Image (spheres, rainbow, N blue to C red):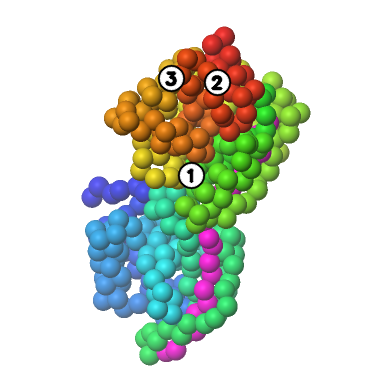
Amino acid sequence: METTTVIETQRLQLREMTPTDRSALCRILQDSEVMYAYNGPFSDEEVDEWLERQLARYRQWGYGLWAVVLKATGEMIGQCGLTLQQWNGREMLEVGYLFQHSHWHQGYATEAARACTDYAFGTLNSPLVCSIIRDNNLPSQQVALRNGMTRQAGVMVKHYRGAEMPHWLFVRPRTIRTLRYHSPCGEMLLGAAGDRLCLCNWAQELHPGRVEQRLRIILKAQFEECGQITETAASQSRQSDGGAPEQCRTSMPEVLQRTVRELDEYFRGERMDFDIPLLLAGSDFQKRVWQQLPSIPYGQTASYGELAAAIGSPRSVRAVANANGANAISIILPCHRIIGSGGRLTGYGGGLRAKQFLLELEHNS
């Protein structure tokens, strides 16, 4: 039976379960050690109900608990995924996980849970994820903590299989992970929400903090620094492999590593277009403007009026100018290629000197 792969990590593949996974699921749900937090192993009927519930969730929500497959062997070793759960009357998106006992203590649950969390933020655009864990389930609590969650105040008692089960709530809000990048024309702040870039802004902008504050509000996210690339380190990396220096790579999301690499290539005159997954935070009109910017060819410019006409709103020149100024992803969405009538250089978040530098770089490459 054909299956749908949802997520891949270094060691694991997460895919939708099918009826053919029943025997592997029994090895998890009918193991007394795995299921101690559920007051014992499941019956055959309970396993069937569990599997059918996941299949129904795929159909209804597009997600649920997925089969976790070890890529090296093709074996289903657990289940991990996202479900909607209640916490004291509040519906929350939960990261859940259960693994075969023989595969405990090898980091698989943490690896899968982190990948599901990134999927929740990056694909489902969720502002927050949680794990609701029984108070005596210490291994699952440790996974939640390694997944960047913190325990919240309060307890919820679940009545399940004839027992009262106190549960704790662990929560992780959406985070924009940031990195400071030193470009030849000024320092930039890069930001990733999950697996997509949402920020490539000038550190010394005309209105400090405005773009970041807008992202906090729209994405309901917190900012978290994951490092910086100093001028010396950036210079060394460009001389070696064109990417981030080794001391930064391990702590950076892959999309930030990729952005650094492509920005380095751009500033060396080796790249004209970018291939980075983006998360645009703005109104529908703003997104239309921003999505049109890459259509302006490298080394060329366009006026605000031409940009307005290109999106089918020729009378909205002022609104287009405002949207262009609100662009949070400079260079990659090349708002520097927009100039005033008569070829005048107009305002730019990084300053007119940076705008002139970028235009000359592209013209001379």
User: Mark 2 — residue?
Assistant: 345
User: Mark 3 — residue?
Assistant: 302
Q: Is residue 281 above or below residue 186?
A: below
Q: Is residue 35 above or below residue 269?
A: below
- Residue in the image at 47% along x and 62% along y: 129
Q: Where in the figure is residue 130, as x and y percent of width and height? A: 48, 66
Where disc 2 sits, the SS reads loop
Q: Residue 301: tell me if it is visible.
A: yes
Q: Nearer the viewer, residue 251 or 216?
A: 216
Q: Are marks 1 and 2 in contact (CB under 8 Å)?
A: no
Q: Where in the figure is residue 78, as x and y percent of width and height? A: 42, 61
Q: Quadrant of the C terminus?
A: top right
Distance from disc 2 to disc 3, alpha carbons, whole Å, reads 11 Å
Label 2 environment density (alpha carbons within 10 Å; few <14, some 14–19, many ≥20): some
Distance from disc 1 to disc 3, alpha carbons, whole Å, reads 31 Å
Q: Residue 251: tell me if it is visible.
A: no
Where disc 3 sits, the SS reads strand
Foreground mark, 1 or 3, reads: 3
- What mark, if any, has residue 89 been given in the picture? none
Specify the segment rendered in magenta.
Answer: 163-182
Q: Nearer the viewer, residue 17 or 254?
A: 254
Q: Nearer the viewer, residue 256 or 66?
A: 256
Q: Are marks 1 and 3 in contact (CB under 8 Å)?
A: no
User: Mark 1 — residue?
Assistant: 195
33 on left or right of 295: right
Distance from disc 1 to disc 2, alpha carbons, whole Å, reads 34 Å
- Residue in the image at 67% along x and 36% along y: 204
Answer with mark 1 or mark 3, whichever residue precedes in sequence.
Answer: 1
Three-letter amino acid code of the residue under disc 2:
Leu
Q: Where in the figure is residue 285, as x and y percent of width and height? A: 36, 40
Three-letter amino acid code of the residue under disc 1:
Asp
Answer with mark 2 or mark 3, whichever residue precedes in sequence.
Answer: 3
